[in-house]
Amino acid sequence: MALLNAQPITLLSGPADNSSYTLNYDIPDQVLSTVTWDCGAPNTVFVLEYSLDADMNQAQIKTLDKEKSVEFTHGLLDDILSDLGGAYLTKKIYWRISSTVTVQTEPSEIRNMNLTGMLKPFTDNRDPQKKEIYQVVKIGNDFWMAENLRATMYCDGAAFTTVDVISKTYSEGPVADSSITGQYYTWPTAVRNMELATEEDDTIIQGVCPDGWHVSTKKDWDNLIEVLSPSPALQTKSTDYWETNYGLTNSSGLNIVPSGVFWHNNLQLPDNGENKASFWTTTLGSETTAFMYEFYDWEQHISAWNYPNRPWAEGDSTASRLVNVRCVRDSN
């Protein structure tokens, strides 16, 4: 006999409103909570609906089965968070159980939970022939790639600009592995759109970084230095490769290695390749300079300096160095 009235979905168990979970990449299958429900409609396939909006606008769905239960594991909840654009972040998620078939049912009540995304490696898929995987660390409220960027094209597949020198690699210093030293970029290549840069310390520019990430800003570095004071360099330098390694802990996991700086008079080998590391920011120091942050073998501190930032073709006195890039996760 056909059902005359919609059959309600009644939640029997599951996380209460405002439950909070910090998701762990190392234990993706561990169950945090089991959701069970009841529904009088027969032969019904259920879905888990989830949204960032309490009204469930533009909700995403995951198809479940007919068992009227689902295990909320670290992996499943992180998938949900990632689907909603909140990977690595803390977000309030609204969810409910609904039906997917023509047998009429009423969705369950809407509940919410606070999810903090897994701190897991990031895969950059821009080059299908050479996918790059980067470790990620959280320092303060910011998520950093714990490796120097290795990209050799922009995220949309475009080649680096022809008015600039192409990016370079280097493996003849104390770090013999170019996948660790990463790629070296001029500032125009790093930021791609120079006209977007300002003297503000928090200008977000994707540049050479993957979608959802940006070239580190001056504010990103200043925040890092504040969080790790009074000895930020000791907590961010790799415990390998540096000649002066007394006190190095790399407790932040940022893993900074000595890589040096290329410039016009040493395009074959970088200066200070054994005792210095440098990273571009998006912040202008003047019309012809941009800030970079530098690490020295003999220093416990991280220093900000202005360097020429114009295209390589403009000449020795005004053109960029080639240094490394670290990407920081966008906050929204």
Image (tube, rainbow, N blue to C red):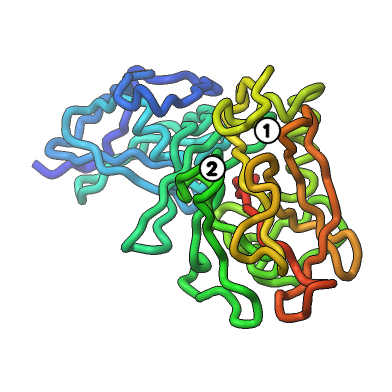
- Asked if one can make out residue 54 in the rendered structure from this viewpoint, the answer is no
Query: Distance of mark 2 from mark 1, alpha carbons?
Result: 18 Å
Hey, what amino acid is under mark 1?
Asn
In the image, residue 63 lies at what x, y percent? 26, 43
Identify whether 48 is placed above or below 155: above
Query: Which mark is on residue 147?
Result: 2
User: Are the residues flagged by discs 2 and 1 in contact, CB closer than 8 Å?
Assistant: no
Hey, what amino acid is under mark 2?
Glu
Question: Would residue 222 be found to the left or right of residue 245 on screen?
Answer: right
Question: Would residue 42 be found to the left or right of residue 15 on screen?
Answer: left
- Neighbour tally class for label 2: few under 14, some 14-19, many 20 plus, Cα within 10 Å: many
In the image, residue 85 lies at what x, y percent? 51, 48
> Which residue is labeled 1 in the image?
141
- Asked if one can make out residue 199 in the rendered structure from this viewpoint, the answer is yes
**Residue positioned 35% across, 22% down in the render:** 27
Identify whether 308 is placed above or below 272: below
**Residue positioned 75% across, 41% down in the render:** 221
**Residue positioned 50% across, 23% down in the render:** 22
